[in-house]
Amino acid sequence: MVVQVERTRARLRDDAWNTEHRDEVPLRRADRNFAELLQELRVVLTGVQILFGFLLTLSFSERFTRLDDVQHAVFVVTLVAAALASTLLVAPVAAHRVTFQRGRKRELVRWVHRLATAGLACLALTMASGVLLVLDIAAGRPVAVTVTGGLLVVTCALWVVAPMRLRR
């Protein structure tokens, strides 16, 4: 309850700032935020869907039968994470269709933000597990684990830590 009250206060402060500095009322701000979110999703979704399509074809290749148990499990994780990322990143379109002309744009923007954040997390998992699988085959497991760990650190630094520092 306390968290929700604080979020409401923060939203009201943001609304007041936007009205004063942008001459933007809350509903217009929601429209702008939704348009910005959709543009971001367009950029990310294309890559996710290409990666997902590529992963779907891999199981039909001759080399797929030679994967060991660990590689097979990593492939499954990668495929499921890509499917989930795609689902989460397309969900805002479905949510918009369901809520279209219902006067729920501000709530929709908050929901879409959560879906996009979860989709990005699944994309990070997809990329890391995909790199782990390919490097395990190409360079060996120790190299694969080391490079994948480094990729995860860089991804967290660029996708979470640096933006959180900018928020302050």
Image (spheres, helix red, strand yellow):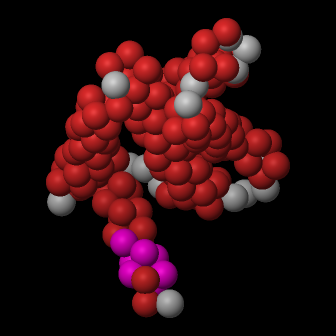
Q: Is residue 41 visible?
A: no
Q: Which residue is drawn at 52% across and 43% down?
A: 122
Horizontal side, residue 153 vs residue 92: left or right: left
Residue projecting furthest to the bottom: 1
Residue 146 position, x and y percent, is 25, 36
* Magenta stretch: dominant secondary structure: helix
Rendered position, 49 above or below 1: above
Residue nearest the observer in this picture, 94 or 13: 94
Pick out the residue farthest to the right.
98
Figure disc tally? 0
Q: Residue placed at 48% from the left, 55% from the top? A: 25
Q: Residue at x 48, y 81 (%)?
A: 4
Find the magenta span and give its range.
Answer: 4-10
Residue occupying image coordinates x 73% and y 14%: 60
Residue 84 visible within the image = yes
Judging depth in this view, the residue of 164 and 156 nearest the camera is 156
Residue at the extreme top of the image, as rendered? 62
Q: Does the magenta stretch include residue 80?
A: no
